[in-house]
Image (cartoon, coloured by chain):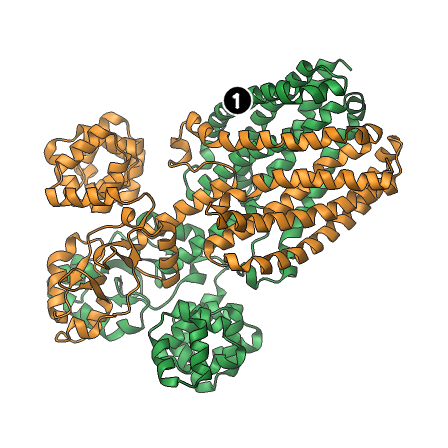
Chain colours: A orange, B green
Amino acid sequence: MNEEILTLIENKEFVRLRSTLSEMNAPDLAVIFEEVPQEHILRLFRFLPKELAAETFVEMDADTQEHLIQSFSDKELHDVLDEMFVDDTVDVIEEMPANVVKRILKHTDPQTRSEINKILNYPKDSAGSIMTIEYVDLKAHMTVAEAFDRIRKTGVDKETVYTCYVTDQNRRLIGITTVKDLLLNDYETKIGDMMETNVIYVDTALDKEEVANMCDKYDFLAIPVVDKETRLVGIITFDDVIDVIQEENTEDIEKMAAILPSEKPYLKTTAFEIFRNRIPWLMLLMLSATFTGKIISSFEDTLATCVALTAFIPMLMGTGGNSGGQASVTIIRSLSLGDVEMGDVLRILRKEFSVSLFCGVSLAVVNFGKMLLIDRGAILASGQDPMTISIIVSLTLLATVVCAKLVGSSLPIIVKRFGFDPAVTASPFVTTIVDAISLLIYFVIAMQFLKF
Amino acid sequence: MNEEILTLIENKEFVRLRSTLSEMNAPDLAVIFEEVPQEHILRLFRFLPKELAAETFVEMDADTQEHLIQSFSDKELHDVLDEMFVDDTVDVIEEMPANVVKRILKHTDPQTRSEINKILNYPKDSAGSIMTIEYVDLKAHMTVAEAFDRIRKTGVDKETVYTCYVTDQNRRLIGITTVKDLLLNDYETKIGDMMETNVIYVDTALDKEEVANMCDKYDFLAIPVVDKETRLVGIITFDDVIDVIQEENTEDIEKMAAILPSEKPYLKTTAFEIFRNRIPWLMLLMLSATFTGKIISSFEDTLATCVALTAFIPMLMGTGGNSGGQASVTIIRSLSLGDVEMGDVLRILRKEFSVSLFCGVSLAVVNFGKMLLIDRGAILASGQDPMTISIIVSLTLLATVVCAKLVGSSLPIIVKRFGFDPAVTASPFVTTIVDAISLLIYFVIAMQFLKF
């Protein structure tokens, strides 16, 4: 597709170029603009019909947007901004350097500019920061026919017309109605008589993840956002909700892998930025492994007389880490989906205890058999009794799995109680703690059996 | 809320109960039904208005649904099924035992029954299996006024009326239009003249994850599903898309934590089911750690003469595992969001090589300093030279981090190329491989420096 467009530019087949471009969708066009050589970008952009141009602009990455804003004439910039929804303009502004932001604000009309500034002032990740102000508002005294007139007149610039918001003279939200309901009622019906008054709304300060969870739960096309006096200030539409869900999922997954959240797609992030997101946890976890090292050092005599024990340290620590990681990731995900709450901690611990016994016993039995069959020779060669070593390792395995599951499942809840994001307590974090625990168990059990 | 309802039942305050219930939302009601004692469920359900009753039924968990279906009179079952959308009925059927399914199918009308059977026959996770058949279809020769008439007449039973689908006499999809466009056009305009003919649709066989990615990309309220002859057979709406996205994310997260995907929320899964989902990978990873054990055994002599080396094994393996896990999780997530593709493998390896050098050098330098400051005494006590041991460990750390990042970032792509889900190559899997590599590097370097 990209090459076809390039050939059309180079052969100056502008008529075909214009018609090819105008039949495409904004997200696909955005990809082409990001890949086309910079000198063609502005020329190509000028071939797009006005509305599609603005839609495509919104979908582009920040670098391409910045290049275009710098190259636009004043009139072009004004036209694009005029077609954009306020929430999209805010998204663009948040990515741009100060001089570009100035240029954007200079070319928006005063009222929009003040709305933009208001949205920019809401706390990061709040409902207010992702809402849009382009909604259809109705009054209770209007008839269905008048409502349709209003939608016809003002709807073209609204992000959605399908849910309409009814406000009183103080701009307080008193009801909602949908175009579907409007269509299914007579033209003479008063909005006040047919609207839904039991409205679910969110406060401007609510975290966007909770907004997304609510929309997911209630299957809302859009959710109204109100200020402290329940005055309607904006709406959040389902497409932005989907974006929030994907962003939050990516963030959770990154945190679970001990990575600081990144803002950009992988291939657009420089190696140094990736390094900056990954090194803090790596460094912290590496230094905290000092602790495990100390445990080993203090049992050095045990190890020196029975080197055979060393061979099973990676397996014990690995299985402990995996067991704990499974439990913590399950609880982290359940917390973020709202499937479990703080109050469930005892039920969780009881369940994980059963699970850990099932897992621990199965693993210990299989390991015991495996050691007697496969590792027998190696253990004998190091001058130890295979039966004793197998019992030590299998008992440690059982105890480690039980501890790991209990630590793994309770940590996310404890961390959440203290107001932190439970996602950071996934595998890497749990592993470091479980490593130390499993080594302690190992040496304590070994010392019992080997009588040092 | 729950207790308020229970008190109302017990005090037989049925008028207040009915009005309290009818003002609530289906998702909230469903939670109450799941928590109320079983003997009250049917009685409580009978207080709900017909439409809300069906909506609430759809939101309940399978156990409560099954209990209700078993207790319903024939008429009640028929009424609930009549109000439900076909895709929701299919979802319910998929969770029910055979005798309940029979009862459901007996009480649906023949046409719906045949539609249900068709949807049940589409492969699991395909677009066909999650679509609904309740959409508004229009003809090209209709006027806007006629289209509105049709929506008014048939719209009440449709899952969405806002996107309408235009089909020819062979039911082939030839265009779409939205209620917004209908509202913004004159009543006399022909649908054929105003409809969007450049329609994006999906095949019944397309994987639901790809359907969700498309809806996310294009911000669709609903996407049409067609058969091989591009005949329209159903639509998938945004609320189902959000559910698919959440399910797929949960599945990916579970796979990354070496857990088999679970179908039910945590608290509703029995300990034995959780065990069954967790034990396969735990067992496999435990057994594959035999390999790491063998490496240690074969270097037993090295370890016996220099036990100090053992103390750093957990730190080296842990840091290697974390480094590899970070890289693999980043690539897995980027693959599933479509940010990177198979063809990007060289760019990824080059980037990860730089990242791993940054990370590896930083970690090695800090570790070197830490060992000389903190571990110096312990190393001296075991009769070794702190400088030599610190150099061995730091060099191993650097090499391990580089290997881990390269393995971690390339594995997901290799696994995907062979048609498997890359999510299984996250931390636990990568860790097991990196453990072995880091031990080999460790002993090889140690033998160079310690001259065995």
Q: Secondary structure at mark 1?
A: helix
Please say if A65 is above or below A185.
Answer: above
Residue B436: give x, y in percent of width and height.
68, 31
Residue A306, quarter of the rendered image: top right
Locate residue B445 relative to residue B154 in the image: left or right. right
Front-lying residue, A351 or A147: A351
Instruction: Tally the numbered discs.
Output: 1
The structure residue drawn at horizontal position 53% and vertical position 77%, both measured from the top left corner, is B37
Residue B114 visible in the snapshot: no
Q: Quadrant of the N terminus of chain A?
A: top left
Q: Is residue B357 left or right of residue B370?
A: left
Residue at coordinates 57% horizontally, 40% vertically from top-left? A429
Q: Residue B28: where, in percent of width, then height? A: 41, 68
For the residue pair B169 and A96, the one nearer the viewer reads as A96
Residue A411 placement, left or right of A140: right
Residue B287 image point, x, y percent: 72, 42
Residue in the foreground of this view, choosing between B132 and B258:
B258
Residue A75 position by quadrant: top left
- Would you name the residue on which mark 1 appears? B362
Specify the quadrant of the image occupied by residue B418.
Answer: top right
- Work out which quarter of the rendered image holds the C terminus of chain A and state it: top right
- Disc 1: which chain? B
Where's residue B256, x and y in %?
55, 45
User: In the rendered image of this protein, does residue A41 appear above or below residue A214?
Assistant: above
Residue at 62 percent of width and 48 percent of height: A407
> What amino acid type is highlighted by mark number 1?
Ser
Binning the other alpha carbons within 10 Å of mark 1 as few (below 14), some (14 to 19) or many (20 upward) gives some
Task: Using the rendered image of the protein, determine whether residue A210 is visible from the camera's viewpoint.
Answer: yes
- Residue at (43% x, 25% y) in the render: A272
Q: Is residue A135 positioned above or below A249 on the image?
A: below
